Amino acid sequence: MTAVAQADYGKHCPKYIILKQKAMQKRDDNHFTREFWRRQGRQLLAIAAALFLVLLLAVVYKRQDLFGEYSKNTLVAAQIVVITVFIGFTAFNWRCPACKKYLGKDISKRACRHCKTRLR
Ligand SMILES: [Zn+2]
C-alpha cells in the first residue's frame, strides 16, 4: 500500500469519521454557546434600558418642577411604548440559536428545553 493510498484509507476509516463528526459537533456547540452569549448580552442590555426608561418616566412625573410638565397620559403612553418595544425585542432576540424557539423566563439557561442544545 502506498502512502497516499494509506492516507486515503485512513479518511474512510469509521474511527476517523466518528472523530471528525465529534469535532464538528463540538464546533457547532461553540457556535451556539457564542450566539447564546451574544443574545444574553443584548437581552440584559434591553432589560436595563427598559427598566431605566420606565423609572425615568416615573421620576419625570413625580418631579415636574425639574423636568417640566407632562400630562400623566403622555407619560403612561410613553411607558407603554417602552414596554411594548421591550416585549417585541424579547420575542425577536430571546430565542434558541439552534432551533429558534422562545427560551422562556430563565435568563441563565444551561440548555434549550426544546432541542436540548447546550447554551453555556
Ligand atoms: Zn433549541
Image (cartoon, rainbow, N blue to C red):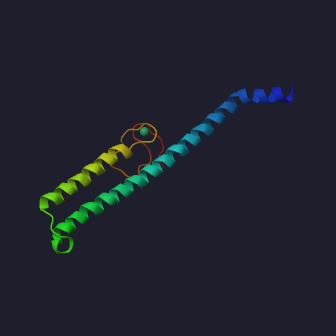
Where is residue 47 drawn, in percent x and y? 33, 56
Name the residue: 21% across, 71% down: 67
The image quadrant where one finds ligand 1 is: top left
Where is residue 5 drawn, in percent x and y? 82, 26
Q: Farthest residue in the bottom direction?
A: 65
Q: Is residue 90 left or right of residue 36?
A: left
Where is residue 84 drawn, in percent x and y? 25, 49
**Quadrant that contains the N terminus:** top right
Name the residue: 21% across, 56% down: 78
Query: In the rendered image, which quarter is residue 92 located in?
Result: top left
Name the residue: 36% across, 50% down: 106
* Image: 80 above or below 25: below
Name the residue: 27% across, 61% down: 53
Q: Farthest residue in the right direction?
A: 2
Where is residue 35 drawn, in percent x and y? 48, 46
Q: Is residue 57 left or right of residue 92?
A: left
Q: Nearer the viewer, residue 21 or 37?
A: 37
Q: Nearer the viewer, residue 97 or 58?
A: 58
